[in-house]
């Protein structure tokens, strides 16, 4: 028996029968009902046989179903199949997750990633930023890497099927994006990327999503985007329900969200749980000008529960001939984005083209002279004193000034 969340799937290979039970519910008298779907691959009875709401705890309901199935497809052990299905699903439903004895649990080799070292395996991650910052294209680029297992731009994915849950556009738009991305990589659209148009909240639709994940073996789910998938992003209850639903999938998830209002630039919009519940959050910025086929994404790691934060990542996206290409760049070379870097890295980048005095560095980086002077004094092993025409300055120890 395979199951994920509230979806149970059972196979009888010899009889060539498949049974799925989902939408389980238990009332105050401990009566458990569920929606049962039965199909067959037996010649002459191939395909769908029956779908109905079934009382799993009722002997008469089981007997009635077995009798009906025998009338549809004679020769099968329908009494045994229905009995086994009900008993095994009831046991799985009531037991829940098994108890784990941690002292005897085998030590994992290391922290596992679906996209190393960016997206942690079987955990919830979140990208957030302004609209039009390239978050959706970035997430679908990662979807292609995972679906194909392609190492690209320093990203090392673990391959597996991907599900795109879309509350913002449609399947045509998703296809166009994938076509541009794969065209830029010189590959066809992968066979194992699946798309679903969504309109209700994720929590209310989670059992159907469970079924798709189970049927297709989904390993990576992308939600685009948080606000319509929850409907009230400022509600702590609805946000908690969203992350509980994601957790029940037991796969790696990436949620696309928007940036907070009122100047909280490095926090996602909505309830504080949007920051607290994911295991890793990334602020996505972009520097783009109208008409320019190139723009740069800055990815800043703003929260990490299970590992150290990553250095800021820069990716250049270029649109040409109906394709889009991604190239790793040094974010320090892009002033519009480098403000998110630590001051030490910004000072170092400002000196790449030659020595400067403290005043010029401070003006370039839009920080105080005291901040520049203090940072240099703390890291004098990286800098060297230089005599300039207009006085004293600083240069990089590993680079000859010109």
Image (tube, rainbow, N blue to C red):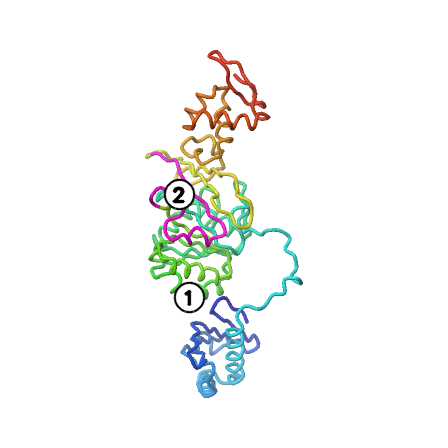
Q: Nearer the viewer, residue 220 or 108?
A: 108
Q: Nearer the viewer, residue 52 or 383?
A: 383
Secondary structure beneath label 1 = helix
Q: Residues within 10 Å of mark 1 (few under 14, many from 20)?
A: some
Decide: is 397 above or below 229: above
Q: Which residues are magenta?
A: 261-289
In percent of width and height, residue 206 lies at: 42, 64
Task: Identify the disc placed on residue 144.
Answer: none
Q: Dividing the picture into quarters, in which one does residue 266 lie?
A: top left
Secondary structure beneath label 2 = loop
In percent of width and height, residue 68 lies at: 44, 85
Find disc 1 in the rendering and name its residue.
208
Task: Work out which quarter of the rendered image holds the N terminus and state it.
Answer: bottom right
Question: For this view, does 180 lie left or right of residue 42?
Answer: left
Q: Nearer the viewer, residue 384 or 332?
A: 384
Find disc 2 in the rendering and name its residue.
134
Is-magenta flag for residue 266? yes
Q: Dividing the picture into quarters, in which one does residue 200 lie?
A: bottom left
Decide: is 393 above or below 10: above
In percent of width and height, residue 69 lies at: 46, 83
Name which residue lies at 50% across and 66% down: 4
Q: Dividing the picture into quarters, in which one does residue 180 lie?
A: top left
In percent of width and height, residue 364 lies at: 42, 25
- Disc 1 + disc 2, Cβ < 8 Å: no
Name which residue lies at 51% across and 28% down: 375
Q: Find the distance from the CA under tag 1 to the CA under tag 2.
A: 29 Å
**N-terminal of the two: label 1 or label 2?**
2
């Amino acid at each position: 028996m395979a199951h994920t969340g509230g979806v149970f799937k059972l196979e009888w290979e010899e009889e060539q029968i498949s049974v799925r039970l989902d939408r389980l519910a238990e009332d105050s008298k401990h009566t458990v009902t569920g929606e049962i779907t039965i199909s067959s691959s037996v010649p002459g009875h191939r395909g769908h046989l029956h779908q109905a709401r079934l009382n799993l705890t009722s002997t008469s309901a089981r007997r009635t179903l077995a009798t009906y199935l025998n009338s549809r497809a004679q020769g099968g052990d329908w009494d045994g199949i229905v009995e086994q299905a009900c008993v095994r699903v009831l046991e799985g439903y009531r037991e829940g997750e098994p108890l784990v004895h941690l002292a005897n649990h085998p030590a994992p080799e290391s922290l596992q990633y679906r996209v190393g070292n960016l997206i942690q395996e079987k955990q919830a991650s979140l990208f957030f930023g302004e609209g039009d910052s390239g978050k959706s294209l970035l997430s679908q680029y990662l979807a292609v890497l995972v679906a194909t297992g392609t190492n690209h731009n320093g990203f090392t994915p673990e391959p597996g099927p991907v599900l795109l849950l879309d509350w913002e556009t449609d399947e045509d738009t998703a296809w166009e994006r994938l076509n541009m991305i794969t065209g830029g990589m010189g590959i066809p659209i992968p066979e194992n990327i699946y798309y679903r148009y969504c309109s209700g909240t994720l929590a209310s639709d989670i059992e159907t999503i469970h079924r798709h994940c189970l049927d297709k073996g989904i390993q990576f789910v992308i939600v685009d985007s948080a606000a319509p998938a929850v409907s009230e992003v400022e509600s702590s209850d609805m946000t908690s329900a969203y992350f509980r639903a994601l957790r029940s999938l037991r796969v790696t998830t990436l949620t696309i969200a928007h940036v907070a209002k009122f100047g909280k630039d490095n926090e996602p919009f909505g309830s504080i749980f949007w920051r607290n519940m994911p295991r890793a959050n990334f602020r996505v910025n972009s520097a783009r000008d109208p008409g320019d086929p190139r723009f740069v994404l800055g990815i800043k790691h703003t929260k990490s529960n299970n590992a150290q934060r990553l250095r800021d990542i820069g990716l250049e996206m270029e649109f040409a001939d109906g394709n889009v290409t991604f190239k790793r760049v040094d974010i320090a070379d892009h002033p519009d984005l480098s403000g998110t870097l630590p001051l030490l890295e910004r000072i170092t980048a400002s000196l790449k083209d030659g020595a400067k005095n403290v005043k010029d560095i401070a003006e370039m980086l839009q920080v105080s002279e005291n901040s520049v002077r203090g940072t240099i004094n703390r890291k004098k092993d990286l800098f060297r004193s230089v005599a300039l025409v207009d006085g004293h300055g600083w240069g990089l120890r590993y680079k000859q000034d010109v």
